[in-house]
Amino acid sequence: IADKYSQGEIRLTVEQNVIFPNVNNTKVSELLQEPLFNIGYYFIPKSDKDFPLSRGLVSCTGSQFCGVALIETKNRAIELSKRLEEELKVDMPVRIHWTGCPNSCGQAQVADIGLMGGPARVEKEIDGKVKKVAVEGVNIFLGGKVGEDPFLGEVYKKGVPADYKYLIPVMKDILKEKFGAMEK
């Protein structure tokens, strides 16, 4: 594809995107018809309005492939974005970055919303008594920015259990309050 459309050049971004530079304007439509852009993944946007959460999604490899990560990230990131897009109308792209540990390979602190793996606790009944038990969780950062006037996001909430039952309501609140999202 790069040989055919962009003089053999392809670039990878820190946001885990691929750029084909120097594509002639008359060839853009033809490029977008290539099988790569039509493989059925729900998160390949066709316009700026499509998949406002999935299109800005970044994730490190998480515990599936990294011994340092505290949580699984990639599958969670995709599934959470998909569920939120099904339930909410979001009129602007939102950059959501996931990272499995404080090493921040997924660059959580420079995202609009960053989720960093960490410990969390939930109440669970054990032997007839309610106890707090450790589970996979995230610390949520808000307001990160790259480019002109860069800014590291600040901690919004620590120790949110990574289970969708806990995470979806928190994310919906953030998207409604900070990004103007509305229920569908």
Image (cartoon, rainbow, N blue to C red):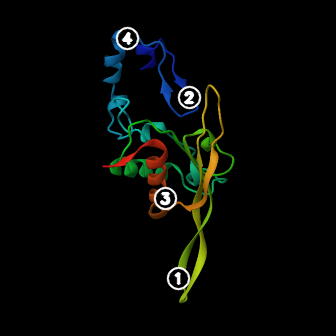
Q: Quadrant of residue 119?
A: bottom right
| Quadrant in which the N terminus is drawn | top left
Q: Which residue is mark 4?
A: 25
Give neighbour class at mark 4: few <14, some 14-19, many 20+ (Cα, 10 Å).
few
The single residue placed furthest to the right in the displayed view is: 103
Q: Residue at x 69, y 46 (%)?
A: 103
Q: Which residue is mark 1?
A: 125
SS for callout 1: strand
Q: Mark number for residue 167?
A: 3
Task: From the viewer's side, name the closer residue of 2 and 120.
Answer: 120
Q: Nearer the viewer, mark 2 or mark 1?
A: 1
SS for callout 4: helix
Residue 49 coordinates in the image, percent (x, y): 35, 33
- Give the alpha-carbon distance from disc 1 to disc 3, as whole Å: 21 Å
Give neighbour class at mark 2: few <14, some 14-19, many 20+ (Cα, 10 Å).
few
- Give the alpha-carbon distance from disc 3 to disc 2, as whole Å: 28 Å
Q: Mark number for residue 13?
A: 2
Label 3 is placed on what type of residue? Leu
The disc, 4 or 3, on the residue closer to the chain's N-terminal end is 4
The disc, 1 or 3, on the residue closer to the chain's N-terminal end is 1
Task: From the viewer's side, name the closer residue of 143 and 127.
Answer: 143
SS for callout 3: helix
- Give the alpha-carbon distance from disc 2 to disc 1, as whole Å: 46 Å
Give neighbour class at mark 1: few <14, some 14-19, many 20+ (Cα, 10 Å).
few
Label 1 is placed on what type of residue? Glu
